[in-house]
Image (tube, grey):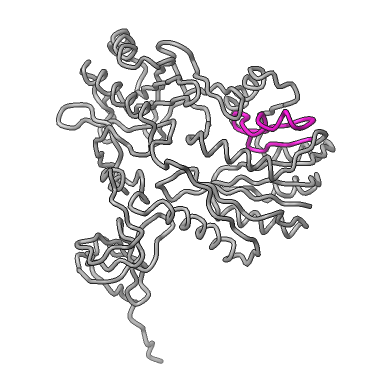
Amino acid sequence: MAKINRQPASKAPISKNETITTTIVDLSYQGMGVAKLDHFPIFVANALPGEEVELQATKVLKNYAFGRVVKRLSDSPDRVEVPDKVALAAGIAPLANLAYPAQLKFKQEQVENVFQKLHLDVAVAETIGMEDPTHYRNKAQVPVQMVKGHLATGFYRRGSHTLIPTDHFYIQNPEVDQAVAATREVLDGLGLQAYDEKTKKGLVRHIMARYGEQSGELMVVIVTNHAKLPGKELIIERLRAKLPALKSLIQNINNVHTNVIMGGENVTLWGADKIEDTLLGKTYQIGPNSFYQVNPKTTAKLYQLAAQKADLKPDDVVVDAYCGIGTIALSVADQVKQVYGVEVVPDAIADARENARLNGVDNASFITADAPEQMQKWQAEGLKPSVVFFDPPRKGLTPEVIEATVAMEPERIVYVSCNPATLARDAAQLIETGYHFDGPVQPVDQFPQTVHVEAVVAFKR
């Protein structure tokens, strides 16, 4: 019988708790420093390319490891002192230690890399950033836990459900931070208990706040484990006294034991069911579950850029696939003949129709449907849009959406993406069907201090 020569399984070149001195060579798409040991990657938080560090391995897997910096032996010229250490530890702002110009360059390179991997020849412009890349978020969904017998709000430590209590989130509008802190104090003062994921007991799961930067209107949502809310009248009275901008106070009931934040039922405790805000001259109503971009300043730039790339004309018929509450559709409606929007979420379409009415827009039609099915239906009905806007979720487009769109033969397609990898994949498929890039890919820093990047690109038939 022949002897089988078994090769030993390849072993990681580092063990857990082992300490080594090495140089950080790259930054991962998650914003972690990357060290290489015999081509074996070690991911390290708060470490930047070019820095020499003494690191300790904290977790070792088959193909990669995680480590922590024990001592930094040299600093990157792009390192900045982080004013808010919690933001970095919690992963709220994983790039906060990187100088802002370097953040913008990193995001441009991220977009370039995904297109190069697919051998797509397209220029990627420099990332459009913000004058002040802090305190920009108009919405927060903050977890609540019991800490030392009191309600605490904050953020989970990276990769865990361990709460780091804080009232200052570095990237959130101060009005939002203040609303969360005030709500927690009122609920804690009434002795309400936080929901416990393990025992499934307790009441308060999350506190959400939304703020209209242009309108100055504030919404607070208390997410609870069940419908009964003790001290309801006192909560209303005390929050109104603490938060003069409060326009809407809502209880959201989420009794499903998952990590989904919002439940399906909203009860307006006081004030309006929705708040309003203005974007590019249009007014939008925003409910607790509405999708509304969290960075109003860059959203305006993003949509203006998308409209410019669409090269809109007065007789254009436009389709806005994945239209949400109608922000892109309504922002271009004045410039074209007709706009059609499609979105799978019924509440979003109800918002879009109400927003059209609110702004006196009568050439926009919104339909509740899954975008792939509706695009196929429109194509079968002979709809011939001259421009199609795509603003899909992170998973990007389906082959069916692309197929139906191409069959409608729009002259121009404008793609607004929140995930460069799926953007590049979908671009490759569009190019195979006879479209070509019309100008460079334009990254926009919609989420400063984080690794996320939006990008806009146009295609011509």
Magenta stretch contains residue 385: no
| Viewport quadrant of the N terminus | bottom left
Is 460 situated above or below 313?
Answer: below
Left or right: residue 343 versus residue 80 is right
> Residue 195 location, x and y as percent?
28, 28
Left or right: residue 19 versus residue 29 is left
> Residue 204 location, x and y as percent?
30, 25
Give the image quarter of residue 301: top right
Magenta stretch contains residue 322: yes
Give the image quarter of residue 312: top right
Left or right: residue 125 versus residue 90 is right
Toward the front, the furthest residue is: 131
Is 306 situated above or below 265?
Answer: below
Q: Residue at x 41, y 60 (%)?
A: 28
- Between 114 and 298, the one lying in front of the other is 298
- Between 421 and 308, the one lying in front of the other is 308
Toward the right, the furthest residue is: 382
- Span of residues in magenta: 317-343
> Residue 187 location, x and y as percent?
26, 19
Is 428 situated above or below 387?
Answer: below
Toward the left, the furthest residue is: 148
Q: Residue at x 41, y 22 (%)?
A: 252
> Residue 244 location, x and y as percent?
36, 14
Q: Residue at x 53, y 52 (%)?
A: 127
> Across the whole image, how many numbered discs are drawn on residues?
0
Left or right: residue 399 versus residue 28 is right
Give the image quarter of residue 338: top right
- Between 184 and 310, the one lying in front of the other is 310
